[in-house]
Amino acid sequence: MSIMAREHTGFVPSLRRIYALVLRHTYLLRSSGPRILELVYWPTVQMILWGFITVFLVNHSSWIAQASGVLLSGVLLWDVLFRGQLGVSLVFMEEMWSRNLGHLFVSPLRPFELGCALLTMSLIRTLIGVGGAALIAIPLFDFSVFSLGLPLLAFFVNLIVMGWAIGLLVSGIVLRYGLGAESMAWIAIFAVQPISGVYYPIATLPEWLQYVAAILPSSHVFEGMRSVLFDHVFRLDLLLHALLLNALYLTAGFAAFLAFFKVARVRGQLLHVGE
Amino acid sequence: MSASVVSVSRVSKHFDSVIAVDDISFDVAAHSTTALLGGNGAGKTTTLSMLLGLLLPTAGSVSVFGVDMLRQRYRVLPRLNFSSPYVDLPRRLTVRENLTVYARLYGIIDIPARIQALAEELQIGRFLNRPYGQLSAGEKTRVVLAKALLNEPELMLLDEPTASLDPDTADYVRGMLEAYRKRTGTTILLASHNMSEVERLCDDVIMLRAGKLVDRGTPAQLLARYGRRNMEEVFIDIARERRLELALDGQQAAKP
């Protein structure tokens, strides 16, 4: 009698194998308190910093006074994008640091399934990190990002998907160029921060840069956030723009990851990567 | 002659201007233990990587169980496994956690029972709950072998399976591989430059030098062909490019 479940060998991703990889990284997370603490640490520090800036500006800025939560909402939602991207890239680099890619890709695991596991782990890490900071903000600044209501879910989904797309691209680049490129995981996302309108309206940007902002899902999300906070209106048009762009971004992110994976197979980088 | 499990046809691998493997062809018979033998840089690990589909050849074709490994490797990956000193397991996970993750990847039905069976077979039970990174080199090798046996593979590709092991542990690993092959009839292809290992385990030897396949035969055939007493001497002959023709000439001359 076979000791293995009947293996499907088609193109459909296997939830069992995706779960196996999620389990691998859950083991890692739960074995280390400092790792969990680290997830919450930066989002909380950022939230506290912008919380005090808000406290100060509420009395000095009529714009902030109209919607005191605009900066804190911005920083927490930005962290969804940042942590979403970082979660994908760090979990992938964990496999490179532990020189585990060879074993993984000799098992029946497909690269696409690895990608799906990375996204799942990114979601878990983001919920722990940003969720923790959001909860701490309630007693500390009497501010709840959850008061945004259902639109918060739309903002969260769009930002994390954009983070995933960039995370997959960065992971592919690190696989292709080696761990020398790992700093990309921390810095790449900040290229889009100034043009995403996290803390100010997109109209603040020069006109030509507004065109660039229009092709970023994040800029539509932050415009939508301000619309909810200042005008109490949920802009469906902005949501649809962001969703459409994200569909393209995520497809491109996966395509880039798979293309870099193929290059790694040509160059022999699956067996010879590590610390 | 048994059917071929592995078939390599005119395979080459170039890394820019470096030719790592140069137009090699060979088959590996079912239920055999075959060695890829050669010095450092001979192309052993590169060849194994191409057999596993981790590395794409520049030219040629590789099939395993009749399946093209370059295009359809996922059809056969559940039937094979491998170990290599160049590939690690996550160091912060315990041995049990590592084996559990890989058992799930391979779709093992009764994971605790399978891990228990391997723990007994490879004597790793006492450190199942220790982080893999805290184990000695010998213990790690046994754990990686346990991982390589999780799915009861029909084909095992082992890259230097006893590298950096003390003689006692190396002997233990060889004994375990011998016993496993006898019990299951699995096919083993191993890359090594350990001659005693090859003489003990292998019934077929493929000699590589500078990426080329330079000779092949059973250990007894190679010893006779080169007129040597052990495989180490044969290895040195080949590594130092003493031509087969010269060896044969020597044999002819020695005949009365």
Image (cartoon, coloured by chain):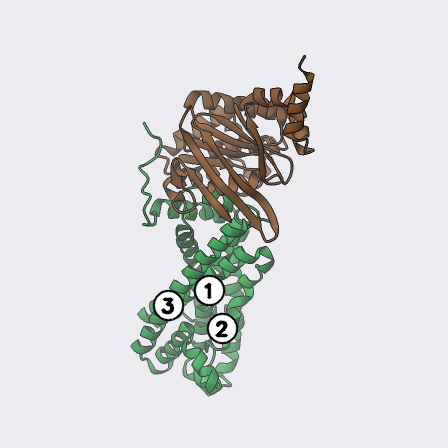
Chain colours: A green, B brown
Label 2 secondary element: loop
- The answer to which image quadrant residue B38 occupies is top right
Label 3 secondary element: helix
- Of badges 3 and 2, the one in the foreground is 3
How far from the left and from the top, in percent, is residue B70? 43, 46
Amino acid bearing label 3: Leu
| Image position of A29 with respect to A59: above or below | above
Amino acid bearing label 2: Val
**Image quarter in which the C terminus of chain B is found:** top right
> B92 or A208, which is in the foreground?
A208
- Residue under label 3: A248
> B206 or B168, which is in the foreground?
B206
- For disc 2, the chain is A
**Who comes first in sequence, dot 1 or dot 3?**
1
> A247 or A61, which is in the foreground?
A247
Residue appearing at x 38%, y 40% in the figure: B67
- For disc 1, the chain is A
**Who comes first in sequence, dot 3 or dot 2?**
2
Q: CA distance from mark 3 to mark 2?
A: 17 Å
Is residue A94 in view? no
> A105 or A100, which is in the foreground?
A105
Left or right relative to B216: residue B251: right
**Who comes first in sequence, dot 1 or dot 2?**
1
- Res. A192 mark: 2
Residue appearing at x 56%, y 40% in the figure: B45
How far from the left and from the top, in percent, is residue B108? 37, 35
Q: Residues within 10 Å of mark 1 (few under 14, many from 20)?
A: many
Amino acid bearing label 1: Ile
- Res. A166 mark: 1
